[in-house]
Image (cartoon, rainbow, N blue to C red):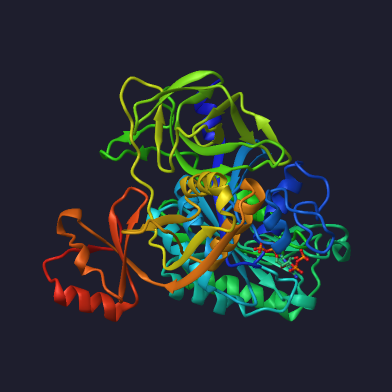
Amino acid sequence: MNLKEEVNKRRTFAIISHPDAGKTTITEQLLLYSGAIRQAGTVKGKKTGKFAKSDWMAIEQQRGISVTSSVMQVDYDGYQVNIVDTPGHEDFSEDTYRTLMAVDAAVMVIDSAKGIEPQTKRLFEVVSHRGIPIFTFMNKLDRDGREPMELISELEEVLGIDAYAMNWPMGMGKTYQGNYDLFNNRLELTHPEENEGNDYLPLNEEGQVEGEYTVKQSVWYEEAIDNAQLLREAGNAFDEDAIRQGKLTPVFFGSALTGFGVQTFLDAFVDFAPSPQAMKTAEGEQVDPLSPDLTGFIFKIQANMDPRHRDRIAFVRICSGEFEEGMDVKIARTDKKIKLNNTTRFMADSREHATAAVAGDIIGLYDTGNFQIGDSIYSGKAKVTFPELPQFTPEIFMKVSPKNVMKQKSFHKGIQQLVEEGAIQLYKTWHTDEYILGAVGQLQFEVFQYRLANEYNSEVTMQSLGSKIARWIRPDQLDPSMSSSRNLLCKDRFDQPVFLFENQFAENWFQQKYPEVQLDSLL
Ligand code: G4P
């Protein structure tokens, strides 16, 4: 294998969007164009009863949401495209955020009738913080939406990023005639049959269709010419460096549902999205993706992805080198040596046995309890440790206990595994060792309860403690008498003390009473 050639072909990205903006539909289009599926509607059809290939768990199917992040690799136009799916529901932000650490680019899908929605903004902030390229797809142009100019200004103002319109819609909804493609200097038509079957019409130097081609004259076409002129004169310049640094987002218009504009978008995406770049280690050194030694980090652990096999899989983003079946690696945290001989690659239509993978790819390692989220692995002599993945402080809490006290064992096993997956956080009350779960969103508890029952045969009782402010305290500063009715003293899963305060007032009151005590929002 030519490592350089293979790595340069990789495009690893995630789609960020608010639920319902069209992430699944656009993913499906990519699978269609790559030949991975033959028919639209196979990825997701809530109404038809078919389910997304990326939706592995029954609960996802039941609720029609994507709970876990999944990975798909497809061949598109000679590129190996890795789509790392992110849970769209806002309750799953923790898992989503970590997934965004494993990609080299992001695609932002926006519903053109709605503009920038809250979840898009939150995810954008994480991606933008990493300085990776962001490509924007303004979706659902086959329906009436907001004015394109207004959408672009909102994007720039709300997200604080410059935008470059790669194309411009001519009309929308029923009048959607096509896109005026500024970048490729052509018109792309929604109804080629009206133009002798031509999907694309070239534009002349004045930006008009001419000669043997004719286009249906319309106010939309005229407006698009004017707007294109305006954008060329007064808009941002196309700047590849700025795109690479995530300072400028190329914007495309289209309709994922009808597939219109998607191919133009994908073609530009694979051209301008970066192949895997050097990654920084915790010590600030750069790891070259073409270095022959394998390095990578675990950004997700998922138990029981396939209900027929009781398995647990650690998702590894490969940062450098080439993975080979049976190779030895070390885990940086424990120095433990592991042979990689039971690995999975994620293809669009199946999970395949992984035989070879390179920097940029994501592989699944069968885990028997060796890995933790954030672990680095390396095959070379020198230890490589990638920076820790960001953690997010839980905001809502539940007391949890087994319904059947005779089933303590499966209860403990289930909790331990789900906590190690990072799906939920576990605390125990300081004195009585009662179990308390913490999460960023309510839905995480529901999934937890469902999975405990289905995968570990353990029914639980949950009692809501509502929202709390979690603050860690240094063990040497702790005096158990600090615990009061306004705070609950707990230990986290590493037995570190943490106070759960009723509200901001309770925290302030505590801080005034014990000014010397340092409270931290993260361990
Ligand atoms: P998500 O993964 O971002 O949550 O969104 P998804 O693709 O599931 O799309 C949400 C809804 O929006 C779906 O309709 C989908 O068909 C529709 N949609 C996506 N892209 C377009 C588009 O370009 N134009 C139009 N008009 N609709 C679009 P649904 O009725 O909620 O679901 P379904 O029953 O059709 O699956």
Count of marks, rendered view = 0
Q: Is residue 395 left or right of residue 273?
A: left
Q: In the rendered view, would you say 481 is above or below 372?
A: below
Q: Nearer the viewer, residue 112 or 91?
A: 91
Q: Out of 408 and 520, give the one closest to the viewer.
A: 408
**Residue 212: horizontal and vertical position, in percent?**
81, 59
Q: Is residue 104 above or below residue 151?
A: above
**Among all residues in the image, which is located at the extreme left?**
516
Q: Residue at x 14, y 71 (%)?
A: 514
Q: Is residue 180 left or right of residue 216?
A: left
Q: Is the N terminus in the top left, top right, bottom left or bottom right quadrant?
A: top right
The quadrant where ligand 1 appears is bottom right
Q: Residue furthest front?
A: 406
Eyeballing the image, is 488 above or below 413?
below
In this rendering, does residue 271 appear at all?
no
Where is residue 372 shown, x and y percent of the image?
Answer: 43, 40
Residue 69, horizontal then vertical, whole percent: 58, 50
Q: Quadrant of the C terminus?
A: bottom left
Q: Could you tell me if residue 428 is visible in this image?
A: yes
Residue at left offset 79%, top offset 59%: 45
In the rendering, at what x and y percent does residue 371 appear? 45, 36
Q: Nearer the viewer, residue 73 or 244?
A: 73
Which quadrant holds residue 311? Answer: top right
Q: Residue at x 36, y 33 (%)?
A: 287
